[in-house]
Image (cartoon, rainbow, N blue to C red):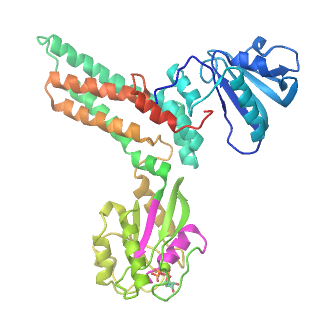
Amino acid sequence: MPLPPLDDTIAAIATAPGTGAIGIVRVSGPASYTVANGLFRPFSGQLPSALPGGRATYGRIEWCGAVIDEALLLSFRNPHSYTTQDLIELQTHGGPAVLRRVLELCVELGARLARPGEFTLRAFLSGRIDLVQAESVLDLVHAQSETARRNASFGLSKVLSRKIDEIQSQLTNVYAAIQAVIDYPEEEVPEAQFHQPLGEAIKTIDRLMSTAKAGMLSRRGARIALIGRPNVGKSSLLNALIGYQRSIVSDIPGTTRDYLEAPLSIEGIPVTAIDTAGIHDSEDDLEARGVAMAREIARNTDLCLCLIDGSRDVVEGDIELLQDLSEERFLVVTSKVDLPAAWHPETLGVKSLPISSVSGAGIEELKGAIRDSLIGTAGTDDLWLTNERHIEALSNTRELLENAIDAPDDLAALDLAEALQILAQITGRTDVAEETLERIFAAFCVGK
Ligand SMILES: Nc1nc2c(ncn2[C@@H]2O[C@H](COP(=O)(O)OP(=O)(O)OP(=O)(O)O)[C@@H](O)[C@H]2O)c(=O)[nH]1
Ligand SMILES: [Mg+2]
């Protein structure tokens, strides 16, 4: 679908569907005040079109002499509005029938139903906000956790856009200097003049990219599996991590046959902890299916806690478990350290974290290790990259800069020109492909 026109008047219910105390219908475009005049009667007797911007006016919504509702009219005037156009918001009672009726009347009076995100699209296309800010509006609306909210408001307040601008201006200077060398080859310009700022730009990108994993996890949540041989204390650890008895614990090996999930939050990242069936060779068909599932889960989670019982001898099966997993995706946990140790920590040849689900020893340290392995060095007060589009653009930019560092001047100039183009697309300062805009704004709700 091509992008919608900008010069007509759009209307939408801006509040969530369902019943609420207040509901809002929003109208933007040149005919906003024609719509307001047609349905809203201020108690002051003024015509809505005579109202100044930035005003809340109390009155009635009426149609053919019938009162639809009492309402507040919020009036905004071009360019001082969300979209920069003339814009009104009608705050009515929040019943679906009221809101639907008001919306119908807006359409009757010349507005068209807005597409998802169309108000924000207008704000972007008019230059009031950049593309990162527009995307952050969407993220803010969808933010379910404090971390997601914090990242979205960083985006909205241009923290990310300013970082991108910084890299861009650094690169523009280098580009200009290289162009000068190409145009005036007789002027000697030392190579170091390009190398250093390019190296710095790469470092800035690397710092940003080091937050990408944390950012992506804060958005989609992380999945952590607890795996290990039967009876090593997986279910006990799950209960200790979440702080209540979710999973059945018993001294009979093979207690957990299916897998079960429990939510917890680590540094604001929503985490799903998954308790699994103890891994061993089983004759029992049902148990064997549980074991196969546990292996599958272990392969498809962001992190595995691999438990080995500290109070019993290590067996071949314990070691085999570790061989299946890639190193950055698992933490080895020695369980039951309140009991006498049956083996020395060095037996495993890998670092392991001692815990006891009974005494609680090591549980906070384990949470810290989970945190480190999920979010790495990303500081909790820093901006995190959360958007795949930004991450891809920055990683492409980085690759071009790496190429440019070692390339002859004319090729380096080409790489830099392309890098600048890609960076500009992040904030949308340069022409962004219509499909990209459509994809971004289609994810919005109607009315935003
Ligand atoms: N002393 C001590 N006992 C523990 C600890 N953790 C678990 N246990 C005991 O070990 C036994 C097995 O615990 P579970 O948590 O059911 O072990 P599991 O790994 O889930 O076992 P399966 O579901 O059978 O694979 C139970 O009797 C627990 O009480 C611990 O930290 N210290
Ligand atoms: Mg269990």
Q: Nearer the viewer, residue 99 or 348?
A: 99
Q: Nearer the viewer, residue 265 or 92?
A: 92
Q: Where residue 218 sits: x, y (%)?
A: 49, 50
Q: Is residue 11 visible?
A: yes
Q: Where residue 383 sits: x, y (%)?
A: 47, 40
Residue 430 placement, left or right of 196 = right
Q: Nearer the viewer, residue 260 or 335?
A: 260
Q: Where residue 312 sits: x, y (%)?
A: 38, 87
Q: Where residue 328 sits: x, y (%)?
A: 33, 60
Residue 378 placement, left or right of 408 = right
Asked if the stretch drawn in magenta spans residue 226, the answer is yes
Say above or below: 75 vs 255.
above
Quadrant of res 324: bottom left
Q: Is residue 356 visible?
A: no
State the quadrant of the C terminus.
top right
**Residue at (47% x, 35% y) in the render:** 440
Asked if the stretch drawn in magenta spans residue 41, the answer is no
Residue 292 placement, left or right of 250 = left
Residue 123 placement, left or right of 42 = left
- Point out the stretch of residues depicted in magenta: 223-245
**Residue at (52% x, 19% y) in the render:** 126
Farthest left residue? Answer: 186
Q: How many marks?
A: 0
Say above or below: 302 vs 276.
above
**Residue at (48% x, 63% y) in the render:** 367
